[in-house]
Image (cartoon, rainbow, N blue to C red):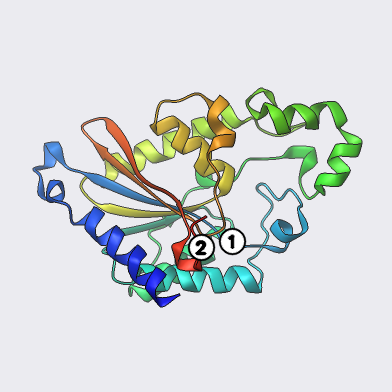
Amino acid sequence: MKTCIKFLALMLTLIIFSPTAAAADENAVTRIILVRHGETSYNKEHRYQGNKDIPLNETGMKQAELLAQSLKDVPIDIFISSPLQRAYVTTQKVAELQGKKIEYTDPRLKEIDYGDWTGQYIADLQKNYPEQFAVWKKKPWLTIMPNGESLQDMQARGRAALNDIVARYPGKTIFIGAHSFFNATIICSVLNISLEHFLQIPQSNTCVNVLEYKNGSWRVLLMNSTTHLNRLY
């Protein structure tokens, strides 16, 4: 476990301290450490939580602590979070170990609004919404949640939040605590690929993604890393 934590810290430090980080303002490299929250009871029970404010469970708290430990020596300038407590507490654990506080929360960083599906078990959705749920599982980009959002809706608000962040903090390293499906749509967006690739971008609890922005262009340097949990995914 200690070896994995040291490896992730070294890897992120090398990324953040790369020579381009010292570029002039007009060529500033801005890095986003985009993280999913730790485990919740809904995750464990296979229930759809979406923007319902469910706290971390005991496992999720431990995952957040391991994440914080792995990042304690990685220089992070700004901490921003979804206002949902599972993301906020995960972010707070990392910030506190660096002696910092969360700068602000942004509701645009919330997980997708599942509408009528919120709080329901996957087995019940399969039974009660068979046709719509089948489309969601195979082609989620074609689904609009009943009385909720589509992936496109979430991606649009999320990308707007991300654009505001990089404009506000050029050349900084920013930690963003967010959510699984949210993160996947953002990664699709910055890579300029269709949401048809959404299912190819897994996001495990407390996974780390590192995005780099420079001169209007994005790169993904690291995706879905969970080495701090002693596993690769």
Q: Which residue is mark 1?
A: 86
Task: Please name the residue shown 71% across and 50% down the image.
Answer: 49
Residue 85: quadrant of the picture:
bottom right
> Residue 12: x percent and y percent?
30, 58
Give the number of the disc on residue 15.
none
Kindly report the distance in space between the C-alpha atoms of the residues bearing marks 2 and 1: 21 Å
* Residue 9 appears anywhere in the view: yes
**What is the three-letter code of the residue carrying label 1?**
Arg
Task: Please name the residue shown 45% across and 63% down the image.
Answer: 227
Dot 2: element: loop
**Residue placed most toward the observer, 202 or 55:** 202
Q: As displayed, is residue 227 above or below residue 203? A: below
**What is the three-letter code of the residue carrying label 2?**
Arg
> Residue 127: x percent and y percent?
91, 38
Q: Residues within 10 Å of mark 1 (few under 14, many from 20)?
A: many
Q: Which residue is mark 2?
A: 231
Name the mark nearer the viewer: 2 or 1.
2
Q: Residues within 10 Å of mark 2 (few under 14, many from 20)?
A: few
Of pointers 2 and 1, the one earlier in the residue sequence: 1
Q: As displayed, is residue 151 above or below residue 211? A: above
Dot 1: element: helix
**Residue placed most toward the observer, 200 or 135:** 200
Q: Residue most toward the left? A: 24
> Residue 162: x percent and y percent?
39, 40
Q: As displayed, is residue 183 above or below residue 159? A: below
**Residue placed most toward the observer, 91 or 16:** 16
Q: Residue most toward the right? A: 127
Task: Please name the residue shown 86% across and 32% down the image.
Answer: 129
Q: Is residue 216 left or right of residue 119?
A: left
Task: Please name the residue shown 71% across and 40% down the image.
Answer: 114
Q: Is residue 204 left or right of residue 190?
A: right
